Image (cartoon, rainbow, N blue to C red):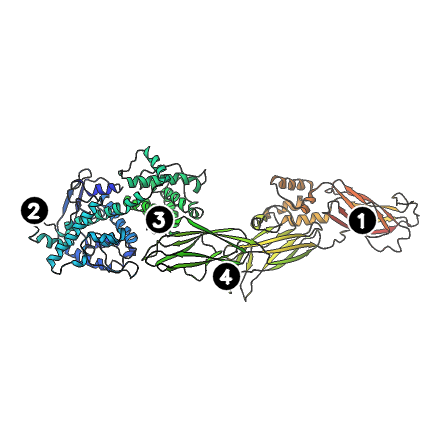
Amino acid sequence: EESSSDSSSLSILSSLGSAVPTVKTLHLQKPNPELSLTTELTNPIASEIVELSLQSDVREDKSLESSSETTAVSVVEGELMAFPLFPVDVTETEYAVHMHKTREAVQQWFYEQVFNCSYYPILGSHSFSTLAQSSKQEYGRSAPVAMRNVFDALERICGRNVRRYFTPLDKQPDDPNGKVTFVHLVYKQLVEFMKAQGALINHVDPKYLMTYDDYRSYWQNPDNKEEHSCEMLSPGMFRCVAIQCWLDLFLQIYKTLFLGPIYGAKSGSDLEAGTRMLSDVEVTHKSKAGQVDMLMGWLTHHYNTQRLTVWTEQAAPKVRVVTNLDSDLEDGLVLAAVTVAYCPFLSPHHFQTMFTQPTTVSQAYHNTVCLTEAWDRIKLGFSMSPRDLMRPNAVKMLMLVAHLYRILPSYKLEATVRFMATLNRSETQVVTLENSEELAITYHIEILPSNTCFEIDNMMDSFVLKRKQKGEIVVRYTARSMVKVNAILLLCGACMPPKFGRNYVFGLEGNPVKLPVSAILNIMSPLNSAAITHITVETPHIVAQDGATVLYDIWTSTSEPQPGHLNALSWAKERKRRVPRRLFILSEKLEIRPVKRSKNGQLKLQVCCFSQAILQYWIIFKNPEMGDFIVQLQITPSAPEPSLGLTFSVDCCSRCNCEGEKQFVCGRSATVDIPCRNLEQWSAVRTMFELTIPSSEKAFWATYLESNIGFRLLQWMLEEKKEMLTEEVEQVFKKSKTYKVSCTSPYIHCTPILQIPNVRARTSVPVQLHVAEDSLQHFETATLTLTSTDGQEIRCYSLNITCKN
């Protein structure tokens, strides 16, 4: 065993991995009751639970007001006197700040992890030092009680059998002197038990774990003659010694009974890899303890293997070797990478906005906010704020890392539950849990990330699973989205007091197997003429009556959507493409105003057909909360009508001298001039193209679009941006075309094939006609039709015949 002079508070904290600053002199003033009360209430969660303890402490603090002693404790290069004193004034030195934060960290850890949020221990307080008997009922079977003691903490950590090493508390004698002797005996057994476990507490005397009244009675007892060799401590001095002894005792309980078993029970390739990396580096941390080195190796391994997974290679942080648990973890990057190693589902929603090379305090603080928000989503069960990470206390950081090492493996996927349903239809699956514990466990249910595709049937956000029983969770998948949806079902049993259990994580995968359309709408449109129309769209989703307006984003596709092959484009981006098209949606979004049970919305369209082809479009409406649905549009061009009248003359008195097949050189032949440019089609192209250009360019294109330079500029723009054009639009930009020529009148024969070398020219080409004899008395109207050989363009002209004689 070490001597008392070597077992100082500093050496104990160093063995736990805490960096303790070196100080010269500590001046311990008379304790301030208000300051003491404020210090013990730093945890707002426990304020109601420790009300009874605080009332006792207030009485104790009032008794200290009569003490006016001021004590100076000499500190020489990190060595304290035989009895280390806890600094009362938190603002005195950096060492005092460190010790107060350490005390708060220890109290918070025992409150959350040991007492399951049922009792907040205030180390050194009168109420906690009193050996009051706690309820004999088990934790979780009764409401949280007001008082606990250190033996309850040992039972929670080691199990019920640990009680056999100590005298039962119900054996306390009734007389005051016997009770004091009994309390001293039990605390002596406690100190000896902890020493046997390897605790470094030679300086912790059992009498300093008692209340001051019991200590004074014990010191004044003539049977304890060995105590008369030293002077009895004043209330102020005793309080400082008692707090420090309790703090050192609890630190050693944490180290030997909690941290030690973790180190001995868990090992793996990741730890060995991390330890090898640490072996080549001079560890600047003051502690050489195996537990701390193991945890730093674990952090190093996962950080260096996950940093390229969490962040892109260009933005990934540099390789690190974690050599301490405070400054190396301040920016949150190492802890984020370790979290992703076990919870990869957190990365897309929480860690992508982190600064991988933080250069300012605000950037590092942003990282810690992202990290703590992610921990809150998975109910980590450890109180840690961004400020705690930015201004780390080494002991609390050690407790945090040890907690992550113990709890993060429970967030690995148990299994993946797969669902298959038709769009806007539902399917359910059952997840079964069994509680093998002796007590009931409350599970918190969380679906990550939050979405409307998955929900829990007939359940709140938590449920209770009784001991030795099975429970079923019915998960409903509604195929609101047209694409596969993944989520995480988190059943957190480690965050709901009074009885904690393990966590369960299941993957949820929703697959839409069919994508039926909600409606099919037919639109008739004239050829080469733009027209504005309105269509009524009804949503299949349930809309709250008289609620807020529901907005759907618009996506379009020219092919039928299939599961896994949507080929849909966002209309918000598609409408900005400077390409003339048959269908242009003038509405930016679909608005559904739920008034008088209406689920309809109006969609404004501008339609122009450039060919006789019947085209189909699939309009997809998306809302992240309501879901998706599809409407199919079929646009049919109406029959073409003559756009221009052509007049030609024929000698009515001449006779046809053609033999057999009609010749175009006889007296009954004539010539009609056909415009090279399809003026009606180009007018339609200009109208649809103007919808895609900003207002600042409309004057330019109105002047030059139909000119040669405008056409070349437009063609260059389409080729430069590699725009994909439909066949009916692409044929507009061809230079030469070949047409089939026909006439509706049986008395007029025309050249069957016509080739126009430049359809953009403003000139005309001749077409040979032959008019039969005596046709004028039968001739009323005739239409000349030119159809391109690819079937995309059609022109119609009305024929007017005049007689020369």
**Under tag 3, what secondary structure?**
helix
Q: CA distance from mark 1 to mark 3?
A: 83 Å
Label 4 vs 1, first from the N-terminus: 4
Residue on which disc 4 sits: 548
Q: CA distance from mark 2 to mark 1?
A: 130 Å
Q: Which kind of residue does numbered mark 4 sit on?
A: Ala
Confirm or deny contact between disc 3 and disc 2 (CB under 8 A).
Answer: no
Q: Which mark is residue 742?
A: 1
**Under tag 1, what secondary structure?**
strand
**Under tag 2, what secondary structure?**
helix
Residue on which disc 3 sits: 407
Depth-wise, is mark 3 or mark 4 nearer the camera?
3
Q: Residues within 10 Å of mark 4 (few under 14, many from 20)?
A: few
Along the viewing direction, whichever of 41 and 103 lies nearer the viewer: 103
Q: Is residue 36 left or right of residue 380?
A: left
In the rendered image, residue 769, in percent from the top left (x then y), is placed at 85, 46
Q: CA distance from mark 4 to mark 1?
A: 59 Å
In which image quadrant can residue 304 be found?
A: top left
Q: Is residue 33 left or right of residue 359?
A: left
Residue shown at the point (20%, 43%) measured from the top left: 200
Confirm or deny contact between disc 4 and disc 1 (CB under 8 A).
Answer: no
Residue on which disc 2 sits: 229
519 w.r.t. 82: above or below = below
